[in-house]
Amino acid sequence: MGVDLRQHQFDPIVFFVYNCGTGAIGPGTGVGRALRARQWNAAADALLQWNKANGKPLPGLTRRRQAERAMFLEADDPFEGYTDSERSWLREYDRLLRQKANPDRRAELREKMAAQRKLI
Protein backbone atom coordinates (compact mmCIF):
# COMPACT_ATOMS: atom_id res chain seq x y z
CA MET A 1 0.00 0.00 0.00
CA GLY A 2 3.00 2.31 0.49
CA VAL A 3 1.75 4.21 3.54
CA ASP A 4 4.21 4.90 6.34
CA LEU A 5 2.54 4.25 9.66
CA ARG A 6 3.81 4.70 13.17
CA GLN A 7 3.94 1.61 15.34
CA HIS A 8 0.76 2.54 17.23
CA GLN A 9 -1.03 2.77 13.85
CA PHE A 10 0.59 -0.25 12.22
CA ASP A 11 -0.28 -2.73 14.98
CA PRO A 12 -4.07 -2.24 14.96
CA ILE A 13 -4.12 -2.30 11.15
CA VAL A 14 -2.34 -5.67 11.25
CA PHE A 15 -4.93 -6.97 13.76
CA PHE A 16 -7.73 -5.60 11.56
CA VAL A 17 -6.34 -7.17 8.37
CA TYR A 18 -5.75 -10.47 10.15
CA ASN A 19 -9.43 -10.53 11.15
CA CYS A 20 -11.01 -9.04 8.04
CA GLY A 21 -8.58 -9.86 5.24
CA THR A 22 -6.45 -7.67 2.99
CA GLY A 23 -9.49 -6.47 1.06
CA ALA A 24 -10.54 -4.52 4.15
CA ILE A 25 -7.81 -1.97 3.45
CA GLY A 26 -8.27 -2.01 -0.31
CA PRO A 27 -8.69 1.26 -2.19
CA GLY A 28 -12.45 0.76 -2.34
CA THR A 29 -13.00 0.73 1.42
CA GLY A 30 -13.32 3.66 3.79
CA VAL A 31 -10.33 2.44 5.78
CA GLY A 32 -8.21 1.99 2.66
CA ARG A 33 -9.11 5.36 1.13
CA ALA A 34 -8.43 7.20 4.40
CA LEU A 35 -5.09 5.44 4.94
CA ARG A 36 -3.93 6.25 1.43
CA ALA A 37 -4.99 9.88 1.90
CA ARG A 38 -3.20 9.91 5.27
CA GLN A 39 -6.43 10.99 6.96
CA TRP A 40 -5.71 9.26 10.23
CA ASN A 41 -8.87 10.20 12.13
CA ALA A 42 -11.05 9.14 9.20
CA ALA A 43 -9.17 5.82 8.95
CA ALA A 44 -9.65 5.18 12.65
CA ASP A 45 -13.35 6.04 12.43
CA ALA A 46 -13.79 3.80 9.38
CA LEU A 47 -12.56 0.82 11.42
CA LEU A 48 -15.75 1.08 13.47
CA GLN A 49 -17.87 0.19 10.43
CA TRP A 50 -16.41 -3.31 10.40
CA ASN A 51 -18.33 -4.57 13.43
CA LYS A 52 -20.94 -6.72 11.67
CA ALA A 53 -21.49 -10.37 10.82
CA ASN A 54 -24.34 -11.23 8.48
CA GLY A 55 -25.26 -7.53 8.49
CA LYS A 56 -25.78 -7.33 12.27
CA PRO A 57 -23.50 -5.52 14.73
CA LEU A 58 -21.88 -7.87 17.20
CA PRO A 59 -20.83 -6.64 20.64
CA GLY A 60 -17.50 -8.49 20.49
CA LEU A 61 -16.60 -7.04 17.08
CA THR A 62 -17.71 -3.60 18.22
CA ARG A 63 -15.38 -3.80 21.24
CA ARG A 64 -12.53 -5.10 19.05
CA ARG A 65 -12.90 -2.27 16.52
CA GLN A 66 -13.14 0.32 19.31
CA ALA A 67 -9.93 -1.03 20.82
CA GLU A 68 -8.19 -0.97 17.42
CA ARG A 69 -9.39 2.60 16.85
CA ALA A 70 -8.14 3.70 20.28
CA MET A 71 -4.74 2.12 19.67
CA PHE A 72 -4.53 3.69 16.19
CA LEU A 73 -5.19 7.17 17.62
CA GLU A 74 -2.87 6.72 20.61
CA ALA A 75 -0.79 9.81 21.24
CA ASP A 76 2.68 9.27 19.87
CA ASP A 77 4.40 12.63 19.94
CA PRO A 78 8.05 12.13 19.05
CA PHE A 79 8.69 15.75 20.01
CA GLU A 80 7.35 15.51 23.55
CA GLY A 81 9.59 17.41 25.94
CA TYR A 82 10.96 19.80 23.32
CA THR A 83 10.30 23.53 23.36
CA ASP A 84 8.06 25.07 20.70
CA SER A 85 11.12 26.39 18.85
CA GLU A 86 12.80 23.00 18.90
CA ARG A 87 9.62 21.31 17.64
CA SER A 88 9.43 23.83 14.81
CA TRP A 89 13.05 23.19 13.80
CA LEU A 90 12.59 19.42 13.95
CA ARG A 91 9.39 19.46 11.88
CA GLU A 92 10.93 21.76 9.29
CA TYR A 93 14.04 19.61 9.11
CA ASP A 94 11.97 16.42 8.69
CA ARG A 95 9.87 18.03 5.96
CA LEU A 96 12.93 19.24 4.05
CA LEU A 97 14.60 15.87 4.44
CA ARG A 98 11.54 14.00 3.07
CA GLN A 99 11.41 16.41 0.12
CA LYS A 100 15.18 16.14 -0.36
CA ALA A 101 15.12 19.93 -0.53
CA ASN A 102 17.24 22.87 0.57
CA PRO A 103 20.42 21.25 1.96
CA ASP A 104 21.70 24.66 3.11
CA ARG A 105 18.65 25.21 5.32
CA ARG A 106 18.96 21.67 6.68
CA ALA A 107 22.58 22.37 7.61
CA GLU A 108 21.49 25.59 9.32
CA LEU A 109 18.83 23.71 11.29
CA ARG A 110 21.35 21.03 12.31
CA GLU A 111 23.64 23.76 13.65
CA LYS A 112 20.79 25.33 15.63
CA MET A 113 19.81 21.96 17.09
CA ALA A 114 23.42 21.12 17.98
CA ALA A 115 23.84 24.49 19.70
CA GLN A 116 20.59 23.93 21.60
CA ARG A 117 21.77 20.48 22.78
CA LYS A 118 24.94 22.07 24.16
CA LEU A 119 22.81 24.45 26.22
CA ILE A 120 20.92 21.58 27.82
Image (spheres, rainbow, N blue to C red):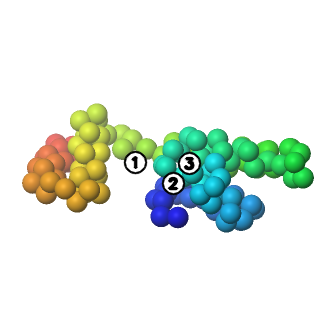
> Does residue 95 sit above or below 85 in this rendering?
below
Q: Residue at x 19, y 56 (%)?
A: 101
> Does residue 85 sit above or below 109 in this rendering?
above
Q: Position of residue 118 (x, y in %)?
A: 16, 48
The residue tagged 2 is 36
Q: Earlier in the sequence, mark 2 or mark 1?
A: 2
Q: Position of residue 60 (x, y in %)?
A: 84, 48
Image quarter in which the C terminus is found = top left
Q: Is residue 56 left or right of residue 31?
A: right
Label 1 to label 3: alpha-carbon separation: 23 Å
Q: Residues within 10 Å of mark 3 (few under 14, many from 20)?
A: some
Q: Closer to the observer: label 1 or label 3? A: 3
> Does residue 77 sit above or below 1 in this rendering?
above
Residue 70 appears in view: no
Q: Residues within 10 Å of mark 2 (few under 14, many from 20)?
A: some
- Amino acid type, label 1: Pro
Q: Count the numbered circles shown.
A: 3
The residue tagged 3 is 34
Q: Earlier in the sequence, mark 1 or mark 3?
A: 3
The residue tagged 1 is 78
Label 2 to label 3: alpha-carbon separation: 5 Å
Answer whether labels 2 and 3 touch (C-beta < 8 Å): yes
- Amino acid type, label 2: Arg
Q: Which disc, if any, is residue 104?
A: none
- Where disc 3 sits, the SS reads helix
Answer whether labels 2 and 1 touch (C-beta < 8 Å): no
